[in-house]
Image (cartoon, coloured by chain):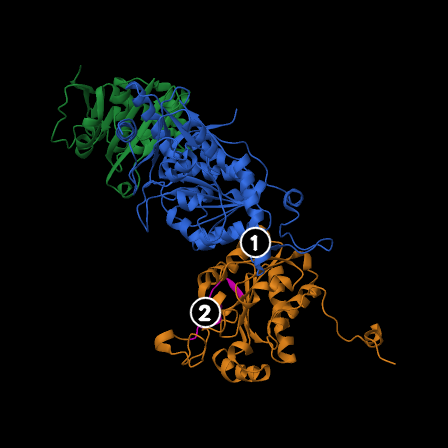
Chain colours: A green, B orange, C blue
Amino acid sequence: MTEEIIIAGFGGQGVLSMGKILAYSGIMQDQEVAWMPSYGPEMRGGTANVTVILSDERISSPILTQYDTAIVLNQQSLDKFESRVKPGGVLIYDPNGITHEPTRKDINIYKVEGTRLAAEAGNPKIFNMIILGGFLKVKPIVKLENVEKGLQKSLPARHHKMIPMNIEAIQTGMNHVEVVNQL
Amino acid sequence: MSIELEDIIKPENIVYKKTPVLTDNVMHYCPGCLHGVVHKIIAEVIEEMGIQDKTIGVSPVGCSVLAYNYLDIDWAEAAHGRAPALATGISRLHPEKYVFTYQGDGDLASIGCGEIMHACNRGENIVVIFINNAIYGMTGGQMAPTTLLGQVTATTPYGRDAKLNGFPLRITELIAQLDGTCYVTRQTVHTPAAVRKAKAAIRKAFENTKKDKGTSFVEIVSTCNSGWKLDPIQANKWMVENMFPKYPLGDMKDI
Amino acid sequence: MAEVKLMKGNEVIAEAAIRCGCDGYFGYPITPQSEVMETLMLRKPWEETGMVVLQAESELASINMVYGAAATGKKVMTSSSSPGISLMQEGLTYLAGAELPCLVVDVVRGGPGLGTIQPAQSDYFQAVKGGGHGDYHLIVLAPASVQEMNDFVDLGFELAFKYRNPAMILADGVIGQMMEKVQLSDYKPRWTDEEIEKISGDWALTGKKANRQRHIATSLELDSYKQEVFNQKLQAKYREMEEKEVRCEEIACEDADYLFVAYGSCSRICQKAVQLAREKGIKVGILRPITLYPFPTKEIANLAKKVKGILTVEMSAGQMVEDVRLAVNGLIPVEHYGRFGGVIPTPDEIVEALEKQIIGA
């Protein structure tokens, strides 16, 4: 199994950390992982994206043009990456701020209202975990228990008290996946 | 009957001996040059303090590039201006060692201005011996950052002109402003009394290293009779009359 | 089993330095490698192993601090990215001339000049052909994974001390910024004074004892004939490295009709390109140089007898391709495909280049 994922959005949406938690979860189940961020001026509040690859085999290129899954969290990222999902692949997006909906018919498209759900919960910081939950519902490539272990590994000890809240947010995301297009 | 050397040099007649920290190598310096005097007093201080096995010198690019041939201690020969960086690396990894740089005015105040400022500002626990003779000796007498206004050199054939070349750099005064330095002094070695004072200053600088006090900076106002195109006596006189007013002797800082 | 972690290449360099018993790091911030010094400062190895970490005022100063410390037989290193490495060339040629071991990490970004902060491989010439003035070489290692960022710190020091020569890890922004699974090395203690005496006692500046001649770290020799003899000695050392230290990896070469030659992150991208090409029925393999100096000349010459053509893939306008052409010596076509200025080639465009420049040519 190899899963090649792009996560893209605004800086500050937790794009990089979502990718990191996913990569750590992969390690917890003995997979090979790669996490390759875009870096540079984009880091300062512009668009941020990260490629995450989980595989049972040695990972070749961390630089990809096509992805099994694209998780896009703003319009620019949707415009950029919709066309780069492999036919039959998955596109997950948050409808907040989206004015041009995705149109492809040869991929599976899902909507997760992460921004709205996080706002309703009164905690914008769990936004990325809600989105991660949505992804894991659609593609259960890592077990929730391994995500929990991954969080323990990736978060400093002083933040471990926040792990249950994050797991809850993942579950919220899992329960709020809306099908837009299914093959 | 002829008199042999052995007849004259008898232990009971010896009033002066070369310190063993100076090697027997014949110095390449021009006759009349003061580098040899400064080398000697450093060597004597090292001997008197008993630190020959704990001292590491860093020689510059300039006339004293070959200083490592004359002092019998471990040496590193630096790229032009970088001696304070080498000394930093050595001293940081060997805090128990006595590390000193020996630099001329071009090396320290021109191409190595950045390195000396920052080493002194960090307060590296080292000694800096700065030989200021207002000229580039090794390359044939070109303008140095400390060359005086009006002074003729190979690259200021009509005399140093402030408009064209800027002003003589009193870098020791700048160094004294830096919080990392504990001792900043300007000395010379043209008379026996001056040599004694300079040696005491160098001794104090090495003692400061022992006490881990920070950077000690000893400028020696010096001559370059070849570069200045004067005989040694005239050169000493020229130094007193022209260099000392611009570069006054004495301690600038001693804490 | 050693600890498995998810880390950035740059962070791993710092961690590996601490674990391999490095005595000192001197550096200056520059993107995309600043995490090396940041990680070290956060880890405070001076409290743990006694390793010294110092932020210098410039790359000129940092490489010369390395020079001073290396002259005392200590294991010391620096890291930087292209513009900073250009500034370090002075120190590097002095280190090579004084025959001192040290490790330099170059996380290459696009140039020339200030260029870009994105990944590139355009400093191949500078790294493998000397870089500074005079006839000398660095030992150059090209990691293609975060794991190799860990492994090559130790290997770099090992080779540097074996040959009394500066070693360089030539990485790029991809390897530096990427996180992968990495198995960190076990801790090795720093060398004691006695060990330094044993390893480098005949040259290190450890303070002149009564029972030995003084040691001088210098690259100066005013007598041309002596300098020529010294140069011959250096050349003999390089020939020995070329004989003994070449490292490379062959990937999918057994049945290959064509060959990619690529190092570092480009070799990773080529692995994907191999998959894509083979799906199309094109049998292509990869020769990945691990040491860029010494270069796997013989290995490439041997493969040139088996394949029909070679495409080098570099994030440069074509630098390593010159060494590949020298190795192949006209036997088969050798072409170059490159993206540069911080642009990373993609697997599909590499396959397209293979089809166009080699197969269809």
x and y percentages locating residue C330 in the rendered image: 38, 34
Crowd band around label 2 with a 10 angstrom C-alpha radius: few (<14), some (14–19), many (20+): few
Q: Residue at x 18, y 21 (%)?
A: A109
Identify whether C354 is placed above or below B128.
above
Q: Crowding near pointer 1: few (<14 within 10 Å), some, many (20+)?
A: few
- Find disc 2 in the rendering and name its residue: B174
Mark 1, chain letter? C
Task: Work out how far the residue at label 2 is from the one at label 1, CA to CA, in angstroms.
Answer: 43 Å
Q: Name the disc covering residue C228, or none.
A: 1
Label 2 vs label 1, nearer the camera: 1
**Label 2 secondary element:** helix
Q: Residue B91 lies in magenta, yes or no?
A: no
Residue at the front extreme of this rendering: C331
Residue that lies at the very extreme toward the left in this rendered image: A99
Q: Image quarter for residue C269?
A: top left
User: In the picture, residue A154 is in which quadrant?
Assistant: top left
Where does residue C66 sit, x and y in percent of width and height? 51, 50
- In the image, residue C26 lies at what x, y percent? 48, 49
Depth check: C123 or C21 in front? C123
What is the three-letter code of the residue carrying label 2? Leu
B133 relative to A8 in the view: left or right = right
Q: Determine the residue positioned at 43% across, 35% down.
A: C327
What is the span of residues highlighted in magenta in the rendered image? B168-182
Q: Secondary structure at mark 1?
A: helix
Residue B42 visible to an observer of this rendering: yes
